[in-house]
Amino acid sequence: MTRTLRIYCGAAETRAALIDDDRAVKFWFAPAIGDEAALRPAEDGDIRLGRIKTISRPLGGAFVDIGDDAEAFLPQSDKASPAVEGVLRIVRVRRPAIGRKGALASADWRGDLPAMSQEKIERDARRSDTPRALGSSIAPAVAIARKASLFHPAAIVVDRADALLSLRSAGIDAKLDETANGGVDISAELDAALARTVNLPGGGRMTIDETEALTAIDIDMADAATTSAAGASDAMNDRAARVLFRELSRRAIGGRVVVDFLPPATSSALRGAFEKRLGETDADLYPRRGGRLLRDGLYDLTAPRREKSLLERATEPVGERFIRAGRRLTLDWRAKAAVASLEGALRRARGRFPTLLVSPDLASYLDARPWLARVGDRFGARFKVETQHRLEERSFEVVEG
């Protein structure tokens, strides 16, 4: 299939999706245009000016202050100069802090950055004597396109002319499409990727549970029509295998993953053929290792974990006093979703005047940020925002008048 990278430059956030067969199979996030220098947690690929705090010879590296009250571990490589406490050093974040695991950094920060970008970062670092983020002059669309280049999209489409200019100035070929969603509703795709269950085409269900230790995935018949027991289980497993790695990719799930398929056919040859297909399916989209299929249907694999999963990015723990805590969408995620929904309504109906209804907590959060003012700058005074006390916490509605 031909993959397209669609970049949505919203007033609150820059979002992007890799589209394959009209479905989002990978997401990226970056600050909104105008928020590039705003404080935010370190992300995979960020370049930071860090200060060596403590050298740990037993661990073979050093702990580095990377600014914004954040710390990362910098392993000592043979190629890098030895770490010296108190010295400033440019590093690249290899993995952000995830749960109780701290961030990892690398002294090899240049990567595939163009020479001009490297020079700008070095000049920026020389002008500073405190740890902080570097490279904020890189346009959000450009930063996303460089990360997405690993997946070789056949086309890049962006929804703002200034972002298109930034991409072309960076030598990245792209085209402009200012329609509502270009045929793919990224908000709906994100909601689906955050859901615990996936309904499989043709029947059946996949249930995905992320834990600190691993991700457990269960495949079950649900309401699928059945024929013979063996034939039904193999057909169900095939349907699940076709979507499994795309779901893992779009949810940004890494680490250890254990899948409980239905017990496959007893034939070792058929089981071996299915295991081979599992190893080859979407291997370029979701690199992993391992992948052994046991006779009872358990399939165990490990994938690189370099970023927060979509669930970790969008939600936070809630109910810590309960026997088992849950998760809820963060206030920041909901506020950005509200702004994106308003922008979508304004694009869809250029002659109408939509109203964004928000709960009091969302109203306060939005009032403290420039996002709604940016919506007005882009679309004009064609909308209203009203606080509704009847709405539950972190809730919003868009009424398209």
Image: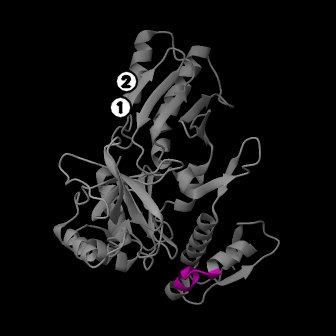
Q: Is residue 368 left or right of residue 214?
A: right
User: Is 112 or 107 nearer to us in this picture?
Assistant: 107
Is residue 152 in view from this perspective?
Answer: no
Residue 59 lies within the magenta run: no
Q: Main secondary structure of the magenta part?
A: helix
Taking the spot 19% from the left edge, 66% from the top edge, the residue there is: 114
Give me the disc on residue 173: none
- Give the labeled residue for mark 1: 280
Q: Residues within 10 Å of mark 1 (few under 14, many from 20)?
A: few
Separation of residues labelled 1 and 2 (CA atoms): 6 Å
Q: How many numbered circles are shown?
A: 2
In the rendered view, tell whether residue 58 sits above or below residue 29. Answer: above
Taking the spot 48% from the left edge, 44% from the top edge, the residue there is: 253
Q: Which residues are magenta?
A: 367-374
Which corner quadrant of the image does residue 57 belong to? top left
Which corner quadrant of the image does residue 51 belong to? bottom left
For the residues labelled 1 and 2, say whether their Cβ atoms are less than 8 Å apart. yes
Q: What x and y, as percent, mark residue 74?
A: 33, 52
Give me the disc on residue 276: 2
